[in-house]
Amino acid sequence: MSNVPENTVYSGPTPQTLNQRTTLTQLRQKYRNSKPITMVTAYDYPSAVHIDMAAIDICLVGDSGAMVVHGHDTTLPITVDEMLVHCRAVARGAKNPMLVGDLPFGSYESSSNQAVDTAVRILKEGGMDAIKLEGGSPSRIVAAKAIVEAGIAVMGHVGLTPQAISVLGGFRPQGRNISSAVKVVETALALQEAGCFSVVLECVPPPVAAAATAALQIPTIGIGAGPFCSGQVLVYHDLLGMLQHPHHAKVTPKFCKQYARIGDVINKALLEYKEEVTNGSFPDARHSPYKISEADAEGFSNELQKLGFDEAASAAAEAVQKLNATK
Amino acid sequence: MHSIRFLTKHSSSTSLLRHIRLMSNVPENTVYSGPTPQTPNQRTTLTQLRQKHRNSKPITMVTAYDYPSAVHIDMAAIDICLVGDSGAMVVHGHDTTLPITVDEMLVHCRAVARGAKNPLLVGDLPFGSYESSSNQAVDTAVRILKEGGMDAIKLEGGSPSRIVAAKAIVEAGIAVMGHVGLTPQAISVLGGFRPQGRNISSAIKVVETALALQEAGCFSVVLECVPPPVAAAATSALQIPTIGIGAGPFCSGQVLVYHDLLGMLQHPHHAKVTPKFCKQYARIGDVINKALLEYKEEVTNGSFPDARHSPYKISEADAEGFSNELQKLGFDEAASAAAEAVQKLNATK
């Protein structure tokens, strides 16, 4: 966990239980020293391990999984139970980054009670260190405050909030006129007031992100918000170029730099596997490691004959010969 | 978090299963007049697999657990896509395949069904969901098809009760793929992930259980971690295809776990436990690590995001109005920051 009892309560972590997980305090220090904070999303064990190995600061189990893992067109369909499965898998894999879990659409908007209950589950059952929720309406601010009061660290999220595409009219960047831009800054401040430890700024013009970042005393984490934020976040699959199908390539977000083209590598590897299976070159001797002794192989052949499986008996004997030939 | 996607042309259903998808076994000439040109059914059918097997063409199978992997397998035109309980290990990070539940499997199945339109889809029955009784087995198999959108199921083992269960599932109208040799759900009695068929009696047992499964109505059988001569014998004795993994080159087809064949995890610890029989066709883990380190580097030194990756604009007039408004509200620093940002952006044009 990120927040194990430290010097303030116990005598401190013993060498055997070295706690290396990024804490809020460490993030605060990075922010104070103007060191950019890095964040990447993860949805399963392997991605969590990779993010851990890269020493990324924060690992976000995002509801973006609804789109990149589950193949939906929006983030709306993913449920709390599905999010918890992702959270647990990530928690198993990432031991160093701070773990933040998204509250999915429909799990926290009705009332502060509902919001606190869901946030509790994300930590209790999901193994996360903190939660993220979207939006800055008055009821949302109240909910954020209630969650903080329940003892759960909250990361806010303003600008384009994908769970609200119904009212936004799609995945549309925000803050592009004066009133919208002021609103971004004001809601970020309100979330800070409610006790948030940071705020994600999504898809707003860079000057707006700069203003919000300057106005706040907590870090801003940007995505599609320009270079003036306290940190950056990207979706795992997007930054890795996971899907290289022409259709998908068309809809990769403009603000996301592809640091690799994993999709191409995967396609090539799968085609090679298919080729080698089809032409019989896989598996070769090196990848057929399990042995039966020659004596037992012969006994096996004889036994098969006794049972009436002549063809099978021949096949076994032939196999032994072929394997000996390739040694 | 999001990425802008307008994914599939088969969209717009709000139900759990996106029902405009292509089942493997749609009514064909035998019932209706056949698929119309507008709805070409491209999904691999049992009949096509049978033909491949008869023509001695190797069958390819790969596991998938989510939408992107399903899309990749679809694009590579792999014959069969297996939603394996191996996901418990490679996706969820457990040490065995035992912990994954039916509900978790169904989530994986649905995601894969959304992504792979051409391969035949097979879903594993997870540990604990089918061993008590044939009733339980049929119920779980039904869920995998009904709620998971799969075309067929796979179950492990060849004990008498297992054969009976397989038969009951086939009688319920659900195609069954068998699985003998090393059956990972049985590591408790096997004493670990231990290859099977390495002495005479064990080898005979592999062949006999495969035959019993064929008798029960299975359309194919997976042979896992047995010596190649044993796999050769089983393949020869059966009239249905065998799909091998760690079973040598004499099977009717091969299967590998997605993450293993791609070299997804390159941590020294994981590299130690990568199966010996699995060829790594790529080292995706290395590529991922490199990409993440580069991202971290660029964020840390401020070079990401550059102008090209900061596309959203506010007009100069509005930016000025915004600055003024912030000043009026008492946010002087914020107002300056906004104005500076505009200048910096103009400078880099």
Image: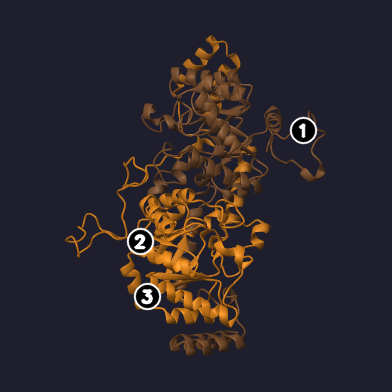
Chain colours: A brown, B orange
In this view, A8 is above or below B110: above
Given contact means CB atoms under 8 Å apart, are the residues at marks 1 and 2 in contact?
no
Q: Residue at x 61, y 25 (%)?
A: A150
In this view, B65 is above or below A108: below
- Few, some or many C-alpha atoms within 10 Å of disc 3 (few <14, some 14-19, many ≥20)? some
Image location (x, y in percent) of residue B334? 58, 18
Asked if both marks, 1 and 3, belong to the same chain, the answer given is: no
Say what secondary structure mark 2 lies in: loop
Please identify the quarter of the rendering in which residue A278 is found: bottom left
Image location (x, y in percent) of residue B324? 51, 13
Image location (x, y in percent) of residue A312? 46, 85
Disc 2: which residue: B174
Q: Nearer the viewer, mark 2 or mark 3?
A: 2
Disc 3: which residue: B53
Disc 1: which residue: A6
**Mark 1 and mark 3: Cα distance apart in space:** 63 Å
Q: Is residue B252 visible?
A: no
**Mark 1 and mark 2: Cα distance apart in space:** 56 Å
- Few, some or many C-alpha atoms within 10 Å of disc 2 (few <14, some 14-19, many ≥20)? many
Chain of residue at mark 3: B
- Few, some or many C-alpha atoms within 10 Å of disc 1 (few <14, some 14-19, many ≥20)? few
Please state if A14 lies on the left or on the right of B124 as rendered.
Answer: right
Amino acid type for the residue under numbered disc 3? His
Given contact means CB atoms under 8 Å apart, are the residues at marks 1 and 3 in contact?
no
Q: Is residue A117 visible?
A: yes
**Mark 2 and mark 3: Cα distance apart in space:** 20 Å
